[in-house]
């Protein structure tokens, strides 16, 4: 992704604002909302090879490399104090929080009758998002030509900073064992197209008790960090640091019911993501048989089978509550799948050192709460 696309990304929110200023605003509907998202992640030893495939229970007892005979006798065996090693778990878990403001402008685009055509529209959206380590802006154009289908395109981008006292990276390279002096700051850009199929039974069978909801969304997103080279991994928003410049798939699937109560949605949400870019997907597949070289002979390791082709799933129940004055709360209990890694490699800080065993697990990952206020 070259510099001109990054410039266009920075200009997008201002361009859209000028567009509305210059246009005839008759027929447009505008709405604003403010929100905050919070998540608590349970602590566990998710990368430990000590368990069998199946459900991985929470654990608040960290595991240290100095206590592992296989690690100490294995390929790396760095001391517990080495920045190239890590412990499994921290004893309390983790939290995630962000706040946002969203502006939307919507207008009907086709004059048509019937339950499937009456809500066709085009929508423009601008959404600044602030977290403790990042600030970014999301922009979208949504076109709904018919009630059950929506086509979306958008760009987003921002920057990040480290929180050193918590050992968190907002935006930085993750390209070596010790990232004490890694490249930080820069610009992260995200560019996507998506299609959504959505269905509400009440559109065909009117009635306040008939809101059975189904939604499936498929998104292709290109990610780009300005300081990352080909196949360089990088952190974004204090995540696992397993991002690359390339295309990924993001799917969201929802089924639920909207009763005419204060609890206005009860359902099930599933998220699905994996790499579309072939060079990333084939970088270190789960079942690859790579030979591990002597890490002392090279600053960069030979690639191992850490699972670049892994298909990630997050799923669980969701409940939404509505209150007076257009306030709402959503609660989600979410599970996630993952890979076990060999004990000889799992205590390395850098994920490219990991070697997958082939066994998989499902864990209770997090409790998420989303607050929104339409005003």
Image (cartoon, rainbow, N blue to C red):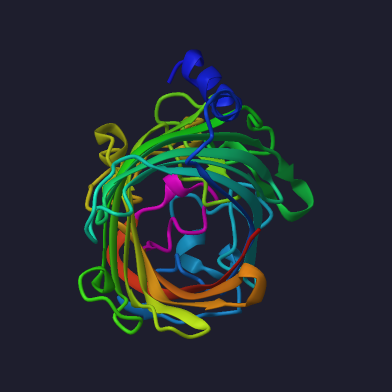
**Residue 135 figure quarter:** top right
Residue 346 colored magenta? yes
Above or below: residue 52 compared with residue 174: below
Residue 281 visible in rendering: yes
Along the line of sight, the residue nearer the viewer: 97 or 28: 28
Where's residue 233, x and y in %? 47, 37
Q: Which region is colored magenta?
A: 339-355
Where's residue 287, x and y in %? 22, 53
Along the line of sight, the residue nearer the viewer: 277 or 272: 272
Where's residue 220, x and y in %? 31, 40
Which residue is depicted at the point 33% across and 84% down?
A: 209
Residue 371 colored magenta? no
Which residue is depicted at the point 24% across and 61% down?
A: 115
Which residue is depicted at the point 59% across and 63% down?
A: 87
Which residue is depicted at the point 61% across and 39% down?
A: 136
Q: Is residue 169 left or right of residue 305?
A: right
Residue 308 visible in rendering: no
Q: Is residue 3 left or right of residue 277?
A: right
Along the line of sight, the residue nearer the viewer: 285 or 79: 285
Along the line of sight, the residue nearer the viewer: 197 or 298: 197
Q: Is residue 199 left or right of residue 226?
A: left
Which quadrant of the rendered structure holds the N terminus? top left
Where's residue 137, x and y in %? 59, 38
**Residue 327 figure quarter:** bottom right
Which quadrant of the rendered structure holds the C terminus? bottom right
From the image, give the main secondary structure of the stretch colored magenta. loop
Above or below: residue 218 compared with residue 58: above
Q: Is residue 335 left or right of residue 136?
A: left
């Amino acid at each position: 992704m070259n510099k001109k696309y990054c410039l266009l990304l920075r200009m997008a929110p201002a361009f859209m604002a000028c567009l509305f200023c210059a246009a005839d605003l008759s027929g447009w509907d505008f709405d604003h909302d403010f929100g905050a998202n919070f998540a608590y992640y349970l602590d566990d030893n998710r990368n430990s090879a000590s368990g069998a495939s199946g459900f991985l229970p929470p654990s608040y007892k960290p595991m240290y490399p100095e206590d592992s005979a296989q690690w100490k006798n294995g390929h790396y065996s760095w001391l517990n104090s080495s920045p190239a090693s890590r412990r499994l778990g921290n004893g309390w878990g983790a939290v995630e929080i962000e706040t946002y403001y969203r502006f939307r402008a919507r207008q009907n685009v086709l004059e048509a009758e019937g339950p499937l055509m009456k809500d066709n529209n085009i929508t423009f959206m601008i959404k600044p998002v602030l977290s403790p380590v990042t600030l970014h802006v999301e922009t979208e154009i949504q076109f709904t030509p018919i009630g059950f289908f929506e086509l979306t395109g958008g760009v987003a981008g921002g920057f990040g900073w480290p929180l050193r006292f918590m050992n968190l990276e907002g935006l930085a390279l993750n390209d070596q064992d010790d990232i004490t002096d890694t490249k930080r700051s820069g610009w992260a850009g995200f560019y996507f197209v998506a299609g959504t199929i959505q269905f509400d039974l009440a559109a065909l069978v009117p009635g306040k008790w008939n809101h059975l909801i189904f939604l499936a969304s498929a998104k292709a997103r290109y990610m780009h960090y300005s300081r990352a080279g080909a196949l360089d991994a990088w952190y974004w928003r204090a995540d696992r640091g397993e991002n690359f410049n390339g295309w990924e798939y993001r799917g969201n699937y929802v089924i639920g019911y909207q009763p005419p109560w204060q609890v206005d949605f009860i359902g099930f949400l599933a998220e699905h993501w994996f790499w579309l870019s072939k060079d990333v997907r084939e970088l270190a597949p789960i079942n690859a048989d790579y030979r591990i070289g002597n890490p002392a002979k090279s600053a960069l390791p030979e690639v191992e089978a850490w699972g670049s082709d892994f298909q990630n799933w997050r799923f669980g129940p969701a409940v939404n509550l509505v209150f007076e004055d257009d306030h709402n709360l959503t609660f989600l209990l979410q599970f996630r799948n993952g890979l076990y890694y060999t004990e000889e490699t799992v205590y390395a800080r850098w994920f490219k050192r990991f070697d997958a065993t082939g066994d998989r697990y499902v864990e209770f990952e997090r409790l998420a709460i989303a607050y929104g206020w339409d005003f």
